[in-house]
Amino acid sequence: MMNEKKKMVPGLRFPGFSGEWEERKLGEVYTQRNERGFDSLQILSVSIHNGVSNEELDSDTLGKKVRRSEDKALYKHVYVGDLVLNMMRAWQGAIGVVQTEGMVSPAYITAIPSTQLYPPFMDYCLRRDETVGQIDNLSYGVTDFRKRLYWDSFIDVLCCIPSVHEQERITAFFKQLDHLITLHQRQITHLQTRKKGLLQKMFPKDGELFPELRFPGFTDAWEMRKLGEVVQITMGQSPNSENYTHNPDDHILVQGNADMRNGQVFPRVWTTQVTKKAEKGDLILSVRAPVGDIGKTDYDVVLGRGVAALKGNEFIYQSLGKMKQNGYWNKLSTGSTFEAINSNDIRDALFMMPKIEEQFQIGAFFKQLDDSITLHQRKLDHLQDRKKALLQQMFV
């Protein structure tokens, strides 16, 4: 018996919409635009993470230093609703819809949407993992970083589209979700900036004994101490790689900053061999590039060679964060290709500390700030996960 043809309908749909979506090649819903720009137009870029905007591309986006050409004679004029893609990075998702008139690099493909499209809908449709996977397969070049998506391949990319009215409804929903995501991102940035400033004001500056900002009732001078005098330090030692597992019932292995996120340790690799250990609540310091990242562990863990464990209070944790922020460890790190600090660097590290009562006050204050950042980060992660799931369920 022949298999029935799969119905082109999403798993999740707004009430009032029915019928199948239509599969189209991009060449059926877009035509190429090649119109010269002019100097008064703003320059737009298309990035992997943010689509089309007037922001400068950076080395994190493309993996190298980017400079915009001063010669704008060949730049392309684009209009609101046009589709723009970076031929060299389309396979990574560098594609998006123009939101404000401007001009783009001649190295970009620019296309005019047909009346079958509500253009902003395509910002979501074409940046889905499935569509980016198609683009990857249709891009060609000697190596990944030489791969390009040319127009003759672009027109063969397949997408499923509903009626324009349903496209508008879906787009409005995801724009609202994006707005919430942006609000949490901004709040996290605001809190992180506030913390960074307070770390400078609530700890003494170099060569000074008193901080600029202080809780009432504290007047004593702070004291310079070596880290090894006030905390117990355990340097990591990696287990044999053949003992690594992915079994959560085995011992959690912490090897470096890849195992830490937002000041916490997250399991990534497990091991059956115990070398050096750290206990729940210990501070974990990255001793390899980038040196000085600091986190807390909520588990008993095995320490790899890329980390050290310290038994310190919340004040010590915040002090280490400030040292990282100020580039303290980078001045000590050695190695031409792979920077690292050693046990002597950690033990002899100098920092300022007040009496224990003031340590508790400072530690509790910054922990409350960190908790607020963590709360917003969790909400942000939840929204981003929700968006990813809905992009699967609400599209065909």
Image: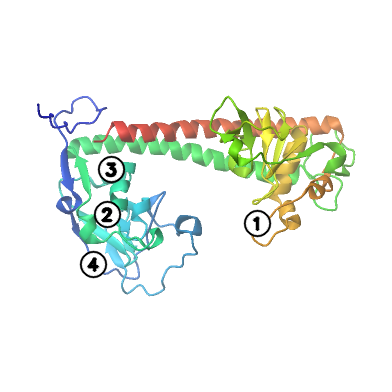
Residue drawn 30% across the image and 57% down it:
139
**Foreground disc of the pair 1, 3:** 1
Q: Report helix, strand or loop for mark 2.
A: helix
For mark 1, does the 10 Å Cα neighbourhood hold few (<14), some (14 to 19), or many (20 or more) residues?
few
Q: Which residue is mark 1?
A: 338
Gap between marks 2 and 4 measured at Cα: 25 Å
Which of discs 2 and 4 lies nearer the camera? The answer is 2
Question: Which sits earlier in the primary sequence, circle 4 or circle 3?
Answer: 4
Q: Amino acid at mark 1?
A: Phe
Where is residue 53? Give x, y as percent.
39, 54
Element class at badge 4: loop
Task: Indicate the amino acid at tag 3.
Answer: Cys
Do tag 2 and tag 4 residues touch (Cβ < 8 Å)? no
Mark toward the viewer: 2 or 3: 2
Picture quadrant where residue 373 is located: top right
Q: Disc 4 designates what residue?
A: 35
